[in-house]
Each structure stands twice: as structure tokens, then as C-alpha cells.
Image (cartoon, grey):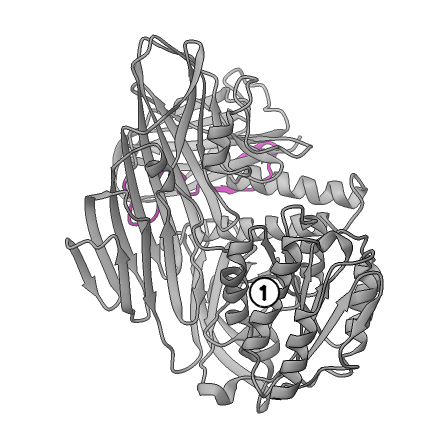
Amino acid sequence: MKSLIVLLTALSMLFPVGAYANGVVEAQVNTSTTLVPATSTVVATRIREQVAITVTTQTFRFEDSLVTNLRYGFPVSSSVTVTGLRYRIGDTWHQAVIRSSDTTISNPVGGNGNAPSSNFTNMIGVLGFVFPLRDTIRGGADVAFELTTVELLPYSRGKVTYTYPVNVLRMVDVNSYVWSVDLRTSRPMFNMSVEPVVEQSERTDTSLAISPISVETTDDIRLSFDQSVDSLAVTMMSSKSANSDGYALLLAVPHVEGTTSIMAKRFTLVVDRSGSMGGDKMEQAKQAAQYCLDRISPFDEVNVIDFDNIATRLYESPKPASSEVVKNCSDRIRGLYPRNGTDITSALLSTFASYHDSSMVNVVVFLTDGVSPINFDRLRTSNTNGTRVFVFGIGSDVNEPDLRRLANEHRGELEVIRIIGSVTDRIGALYERIKDPIIKDPRLTFSPDVMFDFAPATLPNIYAHEQLVVASRYRQAGQVDVSLTGVNVQGTLRNDFSVVLAADDTTAPFVPKIWARLRITTLTDLMSKVALNSDLWREYRDEIIRLGSEFGLVTPFTTFEQGPSDGGGTTSVVASDGPAATTPLGMYPNPASVRSQIAAHFGASHSHAQLSVTDLQGTVVLKINIGAVHAGSWTYDLSLADSNGATLASGSYVVTLTAGTETFTSILRIVQ
């Protein structure tokens, strides 16, 4: 089986709660820099199964005679995929286009050479997304931004949660906004909670509809519901454009039969006690370790290893978690104090050596600030019993890149705890997910073997009330038989089920971008494991740039910049098949050199359609008036030459098809 992208949605590094938020504009008005609050904010949420598409439209009014250095910013985390950005100056809408770079694009992005103010940066976060405008606003005007995002919602302990913070609106004294929801699932929902409470809603056990309604900014948006399963529950979402390979997203939730399904674990708490852990860091580490000890199951085994430049084991290997053993572990943790140097490699080598077999689920909870060189190759070869390493980076100066790599290479997670008051919440959220494993070393096989572009080949363990998420591509539509195998408390496990891969892109047009985002995340992790600017590093970088450009995604090497007028109107409502501004346009072949066939599916007939091709600098290189189009499938043979007949140069181009209220946009790569 080829490589596969597999991620647990609960992984905090990829899918944290509170994924994105409202925006604010910073502008230079005459000679001073000021934060400008939105005069209106409209949030439209569409949820299908556990995928949320959110379109946020915000309008800003400028009364002043001269406004420059304007930038729109909003908080964002890695759980969100930004799939579209449009902006309107006066009455003219523009589609933002992807700009790429061979070197990392720093965020926030500045505007016209001026760095953002500290107030602006504090509101959107150091890694917040910033979209700068080159235009100067003269004489007063309305400027609107329409942001489309896709998020795979976290599923934990049987609960699906959608969160949309409005903290920025509160910070700039905006009192209200407009919100609407269209939610549909295939499995029944119960214990649904909607905040703020909205009376004007229509509910069934598989749907929720809230018409646009004004709500106050007092509370953040939080929508959650429970879903229980009495057998293996599988949801497949897939999308396939004409004459191209498809994209699939598989969500699998195993059935849990009480505590008898839970597998026993070996827990080793590895605590850094080096000199760099002085002050609050040491207290944070002790709190985190004690939290785990207080919740150890009597069926588990436990040990404590503390280290500075030397690793010291409490026991030679983990012991059954009797009350006496747990008390000894707690006493050892309480007695730690910082001293001497740091040797992370030796500490983990000693830990791996204390595990003698893989009959149980082997787990390490590693607490450190990461201030030490790490021999990654040696640790990989020493971890022979499938031990998973869950890393807690402690303090404000955490060596996050190395610790993230350490967690990734040993199939764990990284949590960074910078503020001492957040220790219990942060470790509690992770520990509650990993304390109840039910399937160890799972594998997936497919028949017929039409799935590809899977990575990594090893799936994570499956935990009670958590789901497995698999993204991949496929060559042909139709039914596929799937087998999930692994080890549980009874021994060897096998679950067989069937899924249907879609032959069109009408039901789940968001899946390709989710696949691309997961693929980019995997490539970014791979880059951290090779030498900077090596051939392999550049190969990963080029693939990230290609995916970011093709799918219109923000990456470490791509970002949005100003684009041409798209002539469209507002799309601040979510259409039945996804946001209008981001419906994918089929193109085959892609990459192409001479010709490419364009394919779309119109929901209605239109008297006039127009096709435009724009380079990544925002220049329209080709515009074609298509004429009338009919509802249904549509194709067009596009010659890759400009209006003068000159062949278009190699590079990436934005291809946009508009007809009435329908807009289709994709990236076409030309290779000459």
C-alpha cells in the first residue's frame, strides 16, 4: 500500500479548538496608524458531517480623505484551511491570488513596507494571517473582505465541536454580528448545544438550520453535539472532477463496549530536571506529571525517569500501578529540583531500554523545555517496541521545532505549555484522549486498489470515542471494500466495510483542499528532518509551493495577495454545494503545455459566461467570452495562448469561470 495521510482529528497540533476568529483592519489614516473595527460582520456556517465551511464577510467604512498601508488580519491556527479570499473596494470585487516564494513567507505579512503595530499583532497573534492592500483610499469608501475557510471539526469523547471566537470584535467594541447555520449529518445527533442560544432554529435529529440572525458578541460561537455508535461507524466524503483523479476523506469511529474494550498501557513519565528548567518551568512539569499519576488505571503500569545530564530511573521498568507504586512515583516527582546540564537523547534511550516487549500499549509522557541537542537517528533505531512519545514543551522559550519532530517521529503529539495557569487544561485535554486505547497498530487495506497518495504508512493507535481520519486520492469512482485490522484486548481484530467513491464533485467539493492541507502538513514535517536547502528539502518545498498554488492555500511558501477584478457580487451565504467563490474547476491535463480541457457543472442556465486566465502577479493574460451555457455538465477546450497567439509562459495561473452567480476557480500549471 502506498503512502497515506492519516491524522487523528483530536491531535492538538493539527486540530485545536477555536480554530479561527473575526478580523480587524489596521490602516494609516493621514499620519497616524489606527485599528478600524468592522461596521458589519456576517458569519455563514455550513457543516456536513464533521466538515465546517465558514464564510466571514466584514465591511469597513473609511470616512477620511486619505487611507494608506491598509491590512486585514485575523487569528488563525493550523486546524483551519483558508480556501478563498475576496475583497471589495467601493463597488468592485477582486479575487485574491496566491503568491509563492522559494523562501519562507513570514507572517504576519507587512503592507507597503511598514510593519504592523504591536496592538494589531497582539490581536491576531504572532502567526495570524495578514492580507495587505496596496491601494490608497481617497475621499472615503467602503472596503469589504470575504474569507472562506474549511475545518475538519474535532471529534473527542463522542462529541463534535465547532467553535468560532469573536474576541477581536469584543476588543474593538463591536457589539453584534449576523450568524447563520446549515448543519446536516448522516448519523443522529443528540445533546446538541448552541451558544449563543438562538430561538429561531429548525432542528431534526440529523439537521440544524438557523436563518441569518443578529447576535451579540458577549459569547463566542460554540456548537456541539454527541454521536454514539453501536458498531464500527464509517463516513466517506469524496469528490472527483471530470477527467481527473478524485479525493477522499474517510472518518471511522470504532464501537466501544465499556471498560472491557480498553487496552492496558505502560506509562513512563520522563521529567527534565536540568538547570534550564528553573523557576516556573519545574512547577509546570510537576503539575503535568502529577495530573497523569492521579488518573493512572490500576490495570496500567507506570514508572518515573528524571534526567539532567544523567537519566535516573525510579524502577528498572514500569511496574503495575498499585497504590504503593503510584505513591512512590508521586513522591519522586515532588522531590525534583533543577540542576546540571541536559541530555535528552540519553534520557529517552534509557526510557526505550526499560520497555522489553510490545504486549501492552507503550507510552512516554516527556516533559522538557527541549534545550539540548537530540540525536534523532539514534532514538529512531532504539525505539523497537512501538513506544509512542507525547511531548510537553514547558516554558516560554521552548525548542518547538525539535520537540515537534521528536513527537512526530515517535507517533505522538506535542503540547506547548507557556503559561503556568494552563497546565491542567492542556495536559488534561491530551491525557483524556490517550488514556483509553482500544486498537493498537491498525492497518487499512482497499479492494480494488484504486487509492493512492497515502502517507504515512503507519496509522496511529485508535482510542475510545475518538475517530480515525484518512485522506487519500483515488483513480476511479465506485464501491471499494475496506479492511481495518489491528490488535485489541481479544487479540487480532478485523473489520470489513464498503464505501462508495463519488463520480462527481457536487456533494463534497471541499475534500480536495482538506487532502492538500494534510499533505502539506506531512511535507512540512518531512522538511524538518532533512538538511536545510538540501536537494530533498528543496523537493519538499517545491511540492508545497505546487500544492499551495494549485489548491489556493496559504503555506509557509505561499500567501494571498491582491488580484484582478472578478466582477462578482457578494457571496456571504453558503451555497448548497459550498462557497460560490471556491467551487473547483476541472482541468485536464494539468500541468499542460498547449491545451487543457476545462470542465464545470452549472446549477442553472445562464445567458453569458466568461473565462479568464490570470498570472500570479494579478495580470489578466487571457479573457474569453463563452456566451450562453446550459445547466449541467460543461466542457471547453482551452488553447494556452494569449490574445495575440503567443504561447503562455511556464508557471501557475488562476483560471476563473463566471456565469451569473456561479463562480469556478482553480490553478492551472503550464510547463513548456
From where the camera sits, is residue 362 visible?
Answer: no
| Residue identified by numbered label 1 | 287
Q: Is residue 3 above or below residue 487?
A: above
Q: Residue 208: x, y in percent?
A: 24, 59
Instruction: Name the element at disc 1.
Output: helix
Choose between 148 and 448: the one closer to the eye. 148
Q: Residue 257: x, y in percent?
A: 44, 87
Quadrant that contains the C terminus: top right
In percent of the image, x 63 and y 82: which residue is there?
A: 326
Point out the residue furthest to the left here: 200
From where the camera sits, is residue 498 visible?
Answer: yes
Q: Residues within 10 Å of mark 1 (few under 14, many from 20)?
A: some
Quadrant that contains the N terminus: bottom right
Choose between 302 and 81: the one closer to the eye. 302
The amino acid type, in three-letter code, at marker 1 is Gln
Q: Is 195 displayed left or right of 418 in the figure?
A: left
Q: Main secondary structure of the magenta part?
A: loop
Q: Residue 493: x, y in percent?
A: 57, 85
Choose between 256 and 512: the one closer to the eye. 256
Q: Is 169 displayed left or right of 180 in the figure?
A: right
What is the quadrant of residue 269 in the picture?
bottom right
In percent of the image, x 25 and y 41: which residue is there?
A: 604
Q: Is residue 359 above or below residue 589?
A: below
The answer to if 408 sits in the magenta stretch is no
Choose between 175 and 287: the one closer to the eye. 287
Give the number of marks.
1
Q: Residue 651: x, y in percent?
A: 62, 30
Q: Is 268 displayed left or right of 5 in the figure?
A: right
Residue bounds of the magenta highlight: 573-596
What is the quadrant of residue 184 in the picture?
bottom left
